[in-house]
Image: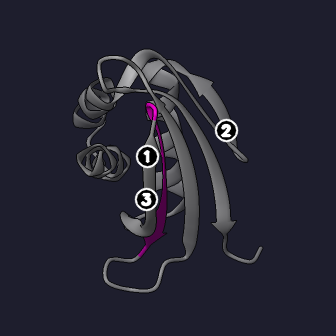
């Protein structure tokens, strides 16, 4: 499962649109959904657009794995950080994912634990 988190975060870090689309297709099912406080989308194109939007809001920042990770019965939860490489994160999130039979993600429920002050 930790490999899935690595591939998930790699998709969020992919800045090339074609490579990002390929990464999204490898990590998520065709009908996957992604819901967080800022987005509620379905399908590969919707997920790729959310990733592109996050990159636009935080140019040059990278997603890295946090410390919390747990999985059971085809469900996993993990924390992630977003910030300048090697520095303290600006955003900290907590995602819960549901896995399909093929090991790809079918649903993401995302939460934002720390966000920049407006």
- Furthest-front residue in this view: 73
Answer left or right for 84 relative to 89.
left
The answer to whether any part of residue 45 appears in the image is: yes
Quarter of the image for the N terminus: give it: top left
Q: Which residue is mark 3?
A: 69
Of callouts 1 and 2, the N-terminal one: 2
Quarter of the image for the C terminus: give it: bottom right
**SS under mark 3:** strand
The answer to whether mark 1 and mark 3 are in CB contact below 8 A is yes
Q: Nearer the viewer, residue 50 or 4?
A: 4
Answer left or right for 93 relative to 59.
right
Q: Please tell me in which quadrant of the rendered image residue 55 appears.
A: bottom left
What percent of the width, then of the height, locates residue 108? 55, 36
Q: Which residue is mark 2?
A: 39
Q: Give the residues drawn in magenta, as a range.
A: 73-83
Nearest to the eye among marks 2 and 3: give it.
Answer: 3
* Mark 2 and mark 3: Cα distance apart in space: 23 Å
Answer left or right for 56 relative to 117.
left
């Amino acid at each position: 499962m930790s490999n899935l988190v690595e591939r998930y975060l790699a998709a969020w870090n992919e800045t090339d649109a074609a490579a990002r689309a390929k990464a999204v297709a490898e990590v998520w099912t065709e009908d996957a959904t992604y819901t967080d406080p800022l987005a509620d989308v379905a399908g590969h194109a919707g997920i790729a657009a959310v990733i592109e939007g996050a990159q636009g809001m935080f140019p040059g920042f990278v997603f890295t794995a946090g410390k919390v990770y747990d999985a059971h019965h085809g469900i996993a939860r993990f924390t992630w950080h977003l910030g300048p490489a090697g520095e303290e994160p600006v955003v900290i999130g907590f995602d819960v994912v549901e896995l399909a039979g093929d090991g790809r993600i079918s649903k993401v429920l995302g939460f934002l634990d720390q966000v920049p002050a407006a």
